[in-house]
């Protein structure tokens, strides 16, 4: 891929200082969203129903509820779209002597791009004065899939993939592999960033794993209402024995993950 036009264009884009700054902005605003999601999760843990949905749409809805937040939504749109495009560029720039590993890395980078661009599109909806429920969208998509031949297997596959990503996050947090993405500052700031990252990755991984399990449950029970995304996953944790303690820990972890992403905006390798 070194000589094709797409790869050449990617190299030129990657060398742009403005593009790099906007990509870092993407990490920062993504961190803000995770902090808000964590705070909403904490309100759910302590029995409050006023926090909204504990997912990206809930966090964006919180921002859209006041004039300053609406202005910030446009910053979030720009940052997430830039970060999504940066991941596309990174995908075209992958180099590895093993073709399978190279394509695996490219798929990973393009997958991240889709995720960032999707949240950016949701943020744009709120910035334009609309609204969107991630939980309802997930349920609707699951209902459509269940009504089609083979849809059950598709939902199970999605659930297993999401659960697998959750396990990946947990392992990444435990092994501290995420530190390879950072040019860590000196101690004690560097130590704090590592702690925030470890706690954050584990908490985000647990939440994603539960999301994946709920998709599988929705498929097995033919009940699309079970596929409630991150909001439903966090509220499902609250319903467990010692659920308040578990959800509180995950909520704090999501806040930590948001703070880590803020640090990555400053010290992340691009």
Image (tube, rainbow, N blue to C red):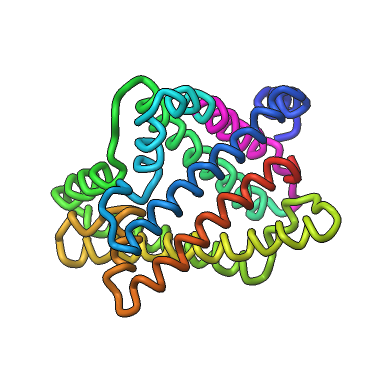
Q: Is residue 45 left or right of residue 26?
A: left
Tell me, yes or no, whether the highlighted magenta stretch contains residue 131: no
Q: How many marks?
A: 0
Nearest the viewer among 15 and 57 is: 57
Name which quarter of the figure residue 136 lies in: top left
Q: Position of residue 70 (x, y in %)?
A: 42, 25
Q: Position of residue 127 (x, y in %)?
A: 40, 23
**Which quadrant does the N terminus fall into?**
top right
Tell me, yes or no, whether the highlighted magenta stretch contains residue 84: yes
Q: Residue at x 40, y 73 (%)?
A: 245
Q: Residue at x 36, y 20 (%)?
A: 128
Relative to 77, is 103 above or below? below
Q: Position of residue 67 (x, y in %)?
A: 41, 23
Q: What are the residue bounds of the magenta stretch?
A: 77-97
Q: Residue at x 35, y 26 (%)?
A: 125
The residue furthest right is 186
**Which quadrant does the C terminus fall into?**
top right
Relative to 203, is 55 above or below? above
Q: Is residue 258 left or right of residue 121?
A: right
Nearest the viewer among 239 and 211 is: 239
Q: Position of residue 106 (x, y in %)?
A: 61, 44
Nearest the viewer among 187 and 210 is: 187
Q: Residue at x 68, y 58 (%)?
A: 178
Q: Is residue 125 left or right of residue 25?
A: left
The residue furthest bottom is 241
The residue furthest top is 128
User: Which SS does the magenta portion mostly show?
Assistant: helix
Name which quarter of the figure residue 4 lies in: top right
Relative to 163, is 89 above or below? above
């Amino acid at each position: 891929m070194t000589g094709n036009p797409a790869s050449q264009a990617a190299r030129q884009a990657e060398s742009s200082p403005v593009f790099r700054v906007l990509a870092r902005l993407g990490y920062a605003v993504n961190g803000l969203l995770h902090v808000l999601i964590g705070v909403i999760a904490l309100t759910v843990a302590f029995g409050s129903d006023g926090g909204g949905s504990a997912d990206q749409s809930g966090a964006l809805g919180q921002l859209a509820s006041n004039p300053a937040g609406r202005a910030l939504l446009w910053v979030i749109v720009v940052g997430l779209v830039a970060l999504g495009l940066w991941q596309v560029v990174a995908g075209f720039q992958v180099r590895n002597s093993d073709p399978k590993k190279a394509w695996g890395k490219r798929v990973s980078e393009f997958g991240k791009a889709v995720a960032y661009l999707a949240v950016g599109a949701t943020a744009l909806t709120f910035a334009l004065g609309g609204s969107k429920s991630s939980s309802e969208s997930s349920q609707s998509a699951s209902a459509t899939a269940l009504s089609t031949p083979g849809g059950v297997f598709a939902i199970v596959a999605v659930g297993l993939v999401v659960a697998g990503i959750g396990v990946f996050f947990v392992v990444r947090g435990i092994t501290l592999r995420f530190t390879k993405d950072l040019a860590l500052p000196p101690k004690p700031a560097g130590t704090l960033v590592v702690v925030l990252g470890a706690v954050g990755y584990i908490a985000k991984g647990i939440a994603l794993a539960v999301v994946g399990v709920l998709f599988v449950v929705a498929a097995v029970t033919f009940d699309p209402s079970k596929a409630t995304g991150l909001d439903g996953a966090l509220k499902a944790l609250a319903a467990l024995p010692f659920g308040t303690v578990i959800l509180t820990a995950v909520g704090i972890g999501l806040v930590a993950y948001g703070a880590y992403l803020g640090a990555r905006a400053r010290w992340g390798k691009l």
